[in-house]
Image (spheres, helix red, strand yellow):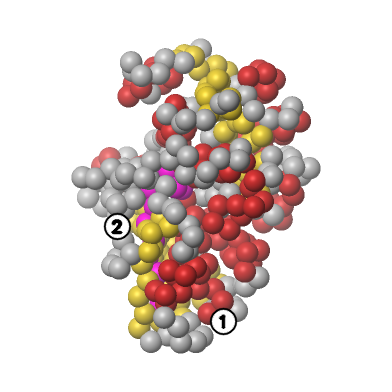
Amino acid sequence: MKIDVSIVGATGYTGLELVKILFNHPQFNITYIANSEGDTTIDKLHPSLSSVIDMEVKKADAKEIAKVSKICFLALPHKTAMSFAKELLALDVKVVDLSADYRLELDTYEKHYCPHEDKENLPNSVYGLPEFYENEIKDAKLVANPGCYPTASLLALLPFVKYIEDKSNIFIDAKSGVSGAGKKLSNSTHFVTINDNIFAYNPMKHRHMPEITEKIKLIENKEFNINFVPHLIPVTRGMLVSVYTTLNQDIDAKSVLEEFYKDDEFIRVKDSCVDVKSTAGTNFCDIFVEQNGNAIFINSSIDNLLRGASSQAVVNANIMSGFEPSLGINKIAYVP
């Protein structure tokens, strides 16, 4: 029997990707789609879905969602998501939240975002990075889907943290396609600004830097000085991360990487530098590593809208539901 699911926040890019994945999913059935306004249909919101899906888009209502679905995907901005998740959880609806509201410990969240309005549920959330939290996700009622930058950065770095001294400087150079900035227009995402251009933004201050730092400490009990610099690049989708640091012992880095991820089907260890096109449209994370003495370079690539958001959210819902993680997840990249 299929499991009924709902999507709240259907207007944006991640909401669209959720609809596309779940519409074709063999075990999930979309019963409710909502945004902040309602009174439209999904094919009017996203004309690419014309003649494919014509479901009504309603104004979000937690009680109505609880009547028709067991799992709800929240593709909402931070702060908005937590107030809605709180209602859903009280109505016994499982939640996969794509915002930042449940990813961080309380002090870290309030320092970098806003006062938290759901302190009761925050400690029970599970960080939705399946390679490290699959067992916890199985029993979770609330999964905090990681951000795109932390996903690509953590998957690259975590296999090597045991070979890096505590308090070491780690430099992460990250580049994202414009869809990572969301659908709302801004000066930096204006065509004239981004076309034929590339630039850094919020260097050493981006909100995802504390997320990366915190998860390394929680997963591997190591503390580093993470120096994170994101860039916007003139492509629609894709994320490329380059990590630079120094090892404290001699290792064969590629062998370490291959052994670390030998049982993880969505990690591909590559023989040369990775690119964004080869992971576009998939849930894969491609990783390459190179050494120069004790200096190490780790290169990772993901689709920021999928592995960095929507397909990872569906993988988490699969695990919560007792399905294989890869059920309904595309593995064929958008190439050429």
Left/right placement of residue 17 relative to residue 72 reads left
Image coordinates of residue 94 in percent, x first then y, are: 66, 34
Q: Which residue is mark 2?
A: 275
Q: Which residues are magenta?
A: 296-310
| Residue receiving disc 1 | 165
Q: Nearer the viewer, residue 216 or 112?
A: 216
Q: Earlier in the sequence, mark 1 or mark 2?
A: 1
Horizontal relation, residue 59 to residue 197: left or right: right
> Of helix, strand and loop, which one carries label 1?
loop
Residue 201 numbered tag = none
Residue in front for this viewpoint, 251 or 197: 251
The quarter of the picture where residue 319 lies is top right
Between residues 33 and 325, which one lies in front from this camera angle?
A: 325
Q: Where does the image place residue 322, in percent across and percent down from the top left? A: 60, 40
Q: Position of residue 119 (x, y in %)?
A: 76, 44
Residue 90 on image: x %, y %: 76, 30
Amino acid type of the residue tagged 1 in the rendering: Glu
The CA span between labels 1 and 2 is 29 Å
**From where the camera sits, is residue 47 visible?**
yes
Quarter of the image with the N terminus is top right
When asked about the image quadrant of residue 85, the answer is top right
Q: Tell me what residue is drawn at x 58 percent, y 58 percent.
A: 132
The residue shown at (52%, 43%) is 324
Viewed as shown, does residue 180 lie left or right of 166? left
Query: Amino acid type of disc 2?
Result: Asp
Element class at badge 2: loop
Q: Is residue 218 magenta?
A: no
